[in-house]
Amino acid sequence: MIRYIHPLRPHDATGLLVPIYAQIKMDFGRVVEPFLLHSQIPELLAGAWMACRETELVGAVPRNVKEAVATAISVKNKCPYCIDAHTIMLQAGGEKDLPNAIVKAKYNKIGDEKTRSVLEWLKYRSEPKPFSLKEAPEIIGIAVYFHYINRISKVLLGETPLPTNQRLLKGTMLNVASQMFSSAVKLPKTTGDSLQFLPETELPEDLAWAKGAANVEGAFSRFAAAVEDAGEIGLPKEVRLEVDNRIDAAFTGKGEAELVDFKDQALNSAAELAFLTAVSTRSVNVKVILAFRRHYPKDTQLLGTLSWASFAAARKIGCQLARP
């Protein structure tokens, strides 16, 4: 279930959405809700899809390692929808016990040394990093992407991609769902195929960790540009500047994390939604959404604001992960 906005589903797709949906269906297996929720801004969907595809689905790092990272980040961010979604993907890749070990943080039960070492690094940030310079763009990239998608999903999606959340039925449904994706998981894919949907652009300095893998660099440079364009739809410039500074303060502990009062209800409602999405997503409730909607009624304004704020937080975390 997608809340608060009205997505454009594949049967309603026109223009750029048509080839994007076709590639998602072929490479991912289905056009699932975390992609659908971006559809009101097709260029944003293109960016989100390529950031996901070029880190999670292709590359030098085994996919199950990256699905494990996606699951672990989702556990850290308490995103139940994404935990279930990537439990499904791990099971589709043949990993039956790994999801439970990640959810319960029993990393000592993980038999694959590479997976275990990467998850322990994410938790403890120990040095040296348990991956090569060639692997770094994919591993840091998948972590950054899921810090992004967890935030926007917690606001716009329900608790599970499954038809019900009842514990007695959940195991069976997870197994059935994993079978639906297994053929797409095993399908050979070519790196860089998603970059066709947006024009080439320069990589922002704070995403320099993406260099070293041309497809990841191309994906995140395009995604960053699409997010900035989307943010301009819902967030005035002065709000973006203020919120970005406060997000930085919240993550680094340097400076004041509290928002200033703009003395304007519209600007304050936009700043509150953006800041909470980035640093305290669980606090984004119906009241916060309605306060924003009173001044910014369009779905594209809400989507742009949530996307910009989610990616602003993810970028800060990416810088921390890339640092020694």
Image (cartoon, helix red, strand yellow):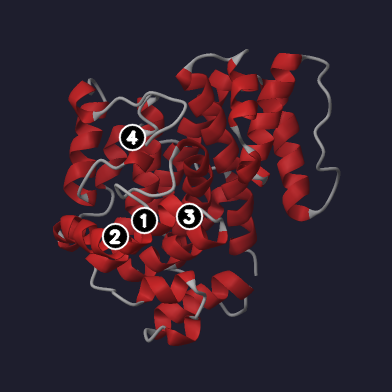
Say what amino acid the circle numbered 3 marks: Ala
Q: Nearer the viewer, mark 1 or mark 4?
A: 1
Q: Which residue is mark 3?
A: 210
Residue 229 visible in the shown view: no
Graded by Cα atoms within 10 Å as few (under 14), some (14 to 19) or many (20 or more), the crowding at tag 3 reads: many
x%, y% of residue 43? Answer: 38, 28
Q: Which residue is mark 1?
A: 166
x%, y% of residue 17? Answer: 26, 28
Residue at image location 43% in from the left, 42% down from the top:
158
Counting residues from the N terminus, which is met first, the one under dot 3 or under dot 1?
Answer: 1
Counting residues from the N terminus, which is met first, the one under dot 4 or under dot 3?
Answer: 4
Graded by Cα atoms within 10 Å as few (under 14), some (14 to 19) or many (20 or more), the crowding at tag 2 reads: few
Give whichever of 276, 26 is nearer the camera. Answer: 276
Distance from Cα at disc 4 to Cα at disc 2: 26 Å
Say what amino acid the circle numbered 1 marks: Gln
Counting residues from the N terminus, which is met first, the one under dot 1 or under dot 4?
Answer: 4
Tag of residue 309: none
Q: Which residue is mark 2?
A: 169
In the rendered structure, are the residues bearing label 1 and label 4 in contact, judged by CB atoms less than 8 Å apart?
no
Tag of residue 36: 4
Task: State the image quarter where residue 272 is shown.
Answer: top right
Counting residues from the N terminus, which is met first, the one under dot 3 or under dot 2?
Answer: 2
Q: Secondary structure at mark 3?
A: helix
Task: State the image quarter where residue 22 is shown.
Answer: top left
- Compared to residue 104, the image places residue 77 above or below, namely above
In the rendered structure, are the residues bearing label 1 and label 2 in contact, judged by CB atoms less than 8 Å apart?
yes
Residue at image location 28% in from the left, 43% down from the top:
194
